[in-house]
Image (cartoon, rainbow, N blue to C red):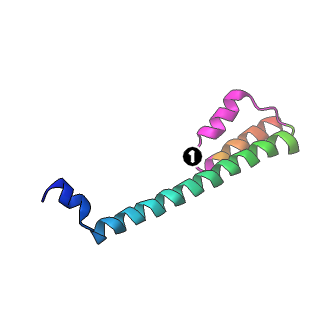
Amino acid sequence: MSMKEFMHNPNAELDQLAEEAERKRTLDEEQADEFQTYIKEKIKMLRKDFHIRLTDEEIAHIHSLETEIAVDNYCHDLFMKLL
């Protein structure tokens, strides 16, 4: 089978794989957007509610964290420094 024939013949299995990949990519993007919103809310809370001045390094570190638990733990540590 030539490449031209391969590209012009419909393949239900490949179509299904492409659809699954697109759904997963969309879900991953939505989760990433939600996580970035979560991080922004935490930074806002630290600044406005607890009056914590965050350095650029601390903000960069918060953005580098990959889970909500890690963000919560780091924010908790920042809060405990004040006490």
> Percent position (x, y) of residue 40?
73, 45
How many marks do you count on the picture? Answer: 1
For this orientation, the residue located farthest to the top is 56
Compared with 5, 12 (above or below) is below
Q: Considering depth in this image, is 65 or 31 the residue closer to the camera?
A: 31
Q: Residues within 10 Å of mark 1 (few under 14, many from 20)?
A: few
Magenta stretch in the rendered image: 52-70
Compared with 71, 6 (above or below) is below
The verdict on residue 54 being magenta is: yes
The verdict on residue 48 being magenta is: no
> Percent position (x, y) of residue 62?
65, 39
> Percent position (x, y) of residue 55?
74, 28
User: Does residue 72 appear anywhere in the picture?
Assistant: no
Residue beneath the point at 41% across and 65% down: 19
Left of 27 or right of it: where is 77? right
> Percent position (x, y) of residue 29?
55, 54
| Amino acid type of the residue that numbered disc 1 sits on in the rendered structure | Glu
Residue beneath the point at 59% across and 50% down: 67
Residue carrying label 1 = 66
Residue beneath the point at 75% across and 47% down: 42
